[in-house]
Image (spheres, grey):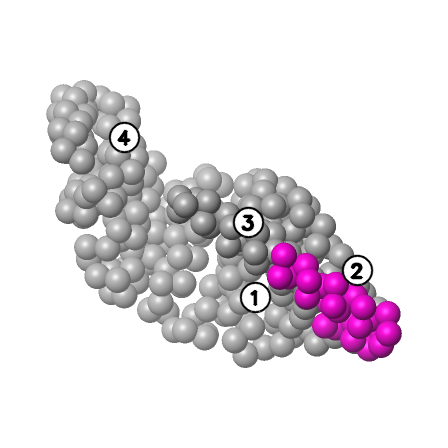
Amino acid sequence: MSENTSLAATAESAIQAARKAVEVQRAAVKEFPGKAPGLVRALQALGDAQRDAEDIAGAEATYREALEAGKNLELSADVMANVRTNLATLLDFSGREAESLPYYEEAIENHEALGGENAEVAAQLRNNLAMTYKCMDKFALAEQHYLRALETLENKRGRKSESVACVFNNLGSLYYAAGFPDQAKEMFEDGLQIRTEVLGEQHRDVAQSLCNLATACHELKDNAGAQQYFEKSLTILEAQLPQEARSYEAIGTDYIAMLEIIGEEGKAGALKKRLEKVLAKV
């Protein structure tokens, strides 16, 4: 049996077990309506299993049924928050960003009401929601949610954490897309500083932050700085081949494009040969 066949069989087994649990809960609800909260949890588990098996339509229908079943029940906020969270991310990552928005908003409200560790979950959801708004060119709304997420994560984890660095990086990307390279550079610098301290100078995420910073520098006409950051980024990734071959090639291609734009055809050609030689060994 191949690995893919084995994984498919495991996924199908999980779905069948979840379906049986749902049917047991359906029967319990008919006899004892107070058992409905158990039905909502069983439906969520089935939706999760369908999502993991990449049955997107099935998972969506199941999550929606769970929300409908819980509509008139006095359920703990975490139960409905989790269902809304899963439906929001399912729709978002399936390319239906606009449909995900109300579920993100409701899930965030639920998680924030719970407080404690759920506040961090809400912050991560705000980060997702901000990305969605950015993709829709709603930059002001995206900024609002990124800043709220940043405030929560800094309060909960302190400034020196990867999750905080991630939000700084996302804010930088937002400002860059919105046409504010100065603010973008500032955010990228903050993210780079945190990642360097938390992850170490040779981490692949540090390389990505350096690439982002290089892009902002180029936009600000600081091409010498941009080249310096691109070179540092490639050096880090080159030491981590073949695992980072895809990132190495992508960042190298961006660097070549920048060199050609600023008229450094000789450097661009040399870099292209360097990339081809290194990647050929991989």
- Provide residue 182's location: percent of width, then percent of height: 37, 46
For the residues bearing labels 4 and 1, Cβ distance under 8 angstroms = no
Residue mark closest to the camera, 1 vs 3? 3
What residue span does the magenta drawing correspond to?
Answer: 16-40
Predominant secondary structure, magenta span: helix
Q: Is residue 10 left or right of residue 223?
A: right
Task: Name the residue tied to disc 2.
Answer: 68
Task: Name the residue tied to disc 3.
Answer: 53
Circle 4: residue type: Thr
Residue 221 in view, yes or no: no
Task: Name the residue tied to disc 4.
Answer: 253
Q: Secondary structure at mark 3?
A: loop
Q: Secondary structure at mark 2?
A: helix
Q: Is residue 69 left or right of residue 211?
A: right
Quadrant into which the C terminus falls: top left
Circle 3: residue type: Ala
Residue at the spot x=30%, y=52% of the render? Answer: 205
Q: Earlier in the sequence, mark 1 or mark 3?
A: 3
Residue at the spot x=52%, y=75% of the render? Answer: 117
